Image (cartoon, grey):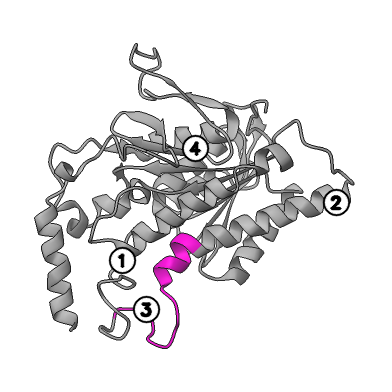
Amino acid sequence: MASASVSGKAALVTGAGSGINLAFTRLLLSRGCNVVLADLNLRPEAEELVQSYTSGSENPGVGRKAQAMFYRTDVSSWTDLSKVFSATKKPYGGVDIVCAGAGVFEPSWSSFWKPPGTGESIVDSVAGGRFKSIDINLTHPIRLTQIAIMDHLRERKAKKTDATPTVRTKTIIHVSSVNGQATPLWSPLYNVSKHGINGFVRTLAPLEKNLGVRVAAIAPGLVKTPLWSETEEKTGPLSKNVVWVTAEEVAEVMLSIVEKNAINSRFRDVNAPSDSVVVPIAGGSILEISGDRVRAVEAFHDPGPQGISREDFDVSQMEEGVFKDLDEHV
């Protein structure tokens, strides 16, 4: 299908208060796309961004006005997800782009290695029947995608459109991870959620051809975001030689999922070096972004993460932490 510009469109981005999703939000706004930021809270830089784009602040780079709106959202609440989707649709007449980006990395308050009932800080209840981190990382993107697709189907029915689309009208982006391929011991629930996202996205690949809805995912490696950089527990075991990817670089790949049908594998080099290849983008695509490259993660016989390896971590230190937690909670 033809490429599409985000200018004049409306986007809903969960987890937009910081990190990758904030970078994507900033990029969308700079291109003239209206954005609703769905999160529990905004970091100061996110608050500043919203203020600068409130009530249609002029965007000289695009020559039109883009708007940003914060909507406090608990993504583990299906009621909140429905409300924020409606709040995005009402002022703009539709939701063209959905980014189900909110996520947590095996937090101490909802971790496989810290079972319900074994600590005051743990939010998972013995009688609750669920893991909060799974609700955030896996159930929320599935439910939000369902809301968006059903809304699109209602729009088609109202317009009495049943023909096969020739133009892509909607894009739904999921945030997976290289952990959707790898299986480190220290993050079981996170690994499960990202493997689940990959399978879910691939399942919905036919929607682009049949409904004009592209469902795709990014699978970043190590990204310089608060999730990593502000937690010594996570950065301590990392090698000093790790090649980080910036949130802004990931955001550019996310924008390509919305606007393009292909991307250069050497995304940092505009001159496309000789060892670069063209990576197709379509419904069902999962694009790994790690090291200095982008590549498509294959459903079968995939070689595994390319820009990050076990050598980038002090595996023994991280596994030792797991067994220490187990000993404390038994």
Residue depicted at 81% across the width and 50% down the height? 155
Viewer-closest of 84 and 71: 84
Label 2 packing within 10 angstroms: few (<14), some (14-19), many (20+): few
Answer with the quarter of the image where residue 146 lies: bottom right
> Mark 4 highlights which residue?
254
Q: State left or right for residue 163 relative to residue 96.
A: right
Coordinates of residue 104 in the picture (x, y in percent): 37, 60
Principal secondary structure, stretch drawn in magenta: loop
The mark that comes first in sequence, 3 or 2, is 3
Label 3 packing within 10 angstroms: few (<14), some (14-19), many (20+): some
Q: CA distance from mark 4 to mark 3?
A: 32 Å
Residue depicted at 53% across the width and 53% down the height? 200
Q: CA distance from mark 2 to mark 1?
A: 42 Å
Figure quadrant of the C terminus: bottom left
Residue type marked 4 = Met
Q: Secondary structure at mark 2?
A: helix
Q: Is residue 101 visible?
A: no
> Mark 1 highlights which residue?
107
Residue type marked 1 = Pro
Q: Is residue 290 visible?
A: yes
Residue type marked 3 = Val
Residue 130 drawn in magenta: yes
Toward the right, the furthest residue is 160
Image depth: mark 2 or mark 1 in front: 2
Coordinates of residue 326 in the picture (x, y in percent): 17, 75
Q: Which residue range is magenta in the image?
A: 121-138
Image depth: mark 3 or mark 2 in front: 2
On screen, 107 above or below 298? Answer: below
The mark that comes first in sequence, 2 or 1, is 1
The mark that comes first in sequence, 2 or 4, is 2
> Mark 3 highlights which residue?
123
> Mark 2 highlights which residue?
157
